[in-house]
Image (cartoon, grey):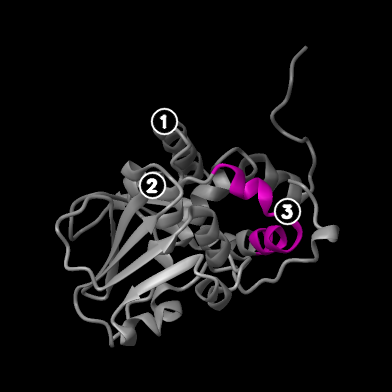
Amino acid sequence: MTTNANYGQYCPLSMAAEFLCNRWTLLLIREMLFGSTSFNDICRGLPLASRTLLSNRLKELIQKEIVTKSKNTDTGQTQYLLTEAGLELGAVIKAMASWGQEWLQTEPALAEIDESLLMWDIRRNAKPLAILPDPFIVHFHLNDIAENRANHWLIYENDEVDLCYIDHDFNIDVVIDVSVKKLVKIWMGWDDYDAAINDSSLIVEGSKKYVDITKVWLGQSSIAHVKKHPENKRINA
């Protein structure tokens, strides 16, 4: 028996779904909407996808004129950019993410957390502030996982934020000690930051003038403001 990859319908939804609903495609576009332009950065945001698969997905999106491939004139490196059509998918992806935030149960997302992906997500949403020293270095200690995966450093420098997994004998400004699950819940807006501080499930130490504005320079997920429905109304993914 033969199968057809196409839905065979004239409906624009079916035509769009034929390539947008391929595994990893929408998440790849999400990474580009967040500002990733190099292949390595796209891969960092999708650590469970093989590089070969992501390369093939990019080729498909280039064929569909959703993505362009070119050389960065400053660095000479290959870069991938969304076309006008690709950028307009931002509204689609935001709507899907908001729906998931509202309606889906949280526990499945907490079953197996990739801490490197969590920290990468935090890095791209962190906010450099003029009041912060340059550089401003934050040490995250994730206290519920193996020590060789537990330490991460955010480096705020030259109006950008970088992420490091190796201790280079940094001069630390703020230390954050928290479990991975609690950090996810706070980051996603599922748990309250101040309540976590009060019950010591989140510990933030450093100069008071920086600690007091942690919520500002740390930021939150782009959909943290979307409130979840009561648990008895949510659905399992």
Q: Is residue 104 above or below residue 132?
A: above
Q: Nearer the viewer, residue 164 or 55?
A: 164
Query: What residue range appears in magenta?
Result: 95-112
Check contact, mark 1 vs mark 3: CB within 8 A: no
Check contact, mark 3 vs mark 2: CB within 8 A: no
Q: Is residue 126 above or below residue 207?
A: above
3D distance between C-alphas at marks 3 and 2: 26 Å
Residue corresponding to mark 3 = 105
Q: Point out residue 124 in the picture as x, y percentages from the top left corner.
A: 40, 64
Q: Which residue corresponds to the image point at 62% horizontal and 49% vertical from the top-left?
A: 109
Judge left or right: residue 214 versus residue 6.
left
Query: 10 Å neighbourhood of mark 1: few (<14), some, or many (≥20)?
Result: few
Q: Nearer the viewer, residue 14 or 105?
A: 105
Judge left or right: residue 60 versus residue 22.
left
Instruction: Assign a secondary structure to mark 3.
Output: loop
The first of marks 1 and 2 along the sequence is 2
Query: 10 Å neighbourhood of mark 2: few (<14), some, or many (≥20)?
Result: some
Q: Is residue 13 visible?
A: yes
Residue corresponding to mark 1 = 52
Residue corresponding to mark 2 = 44
3D distance between C-alphas at marks 1 and 2: 14 Å
The kind of residue tagged 1 is: Thr
Q: Which residue corresponds to the image point at 33% horizontal and 85% vertical from the top-left?
A: 208
The first of marks 1 and 3 along the sequence is 1
Residue 7 circle label: none
The secondary structure making up most of the magenta span is helix
1 vs 3, front mark: 3
User: In which image quadrant can residue 14 be found?
Assistant: top right
- Residue at the far front: name it: 199
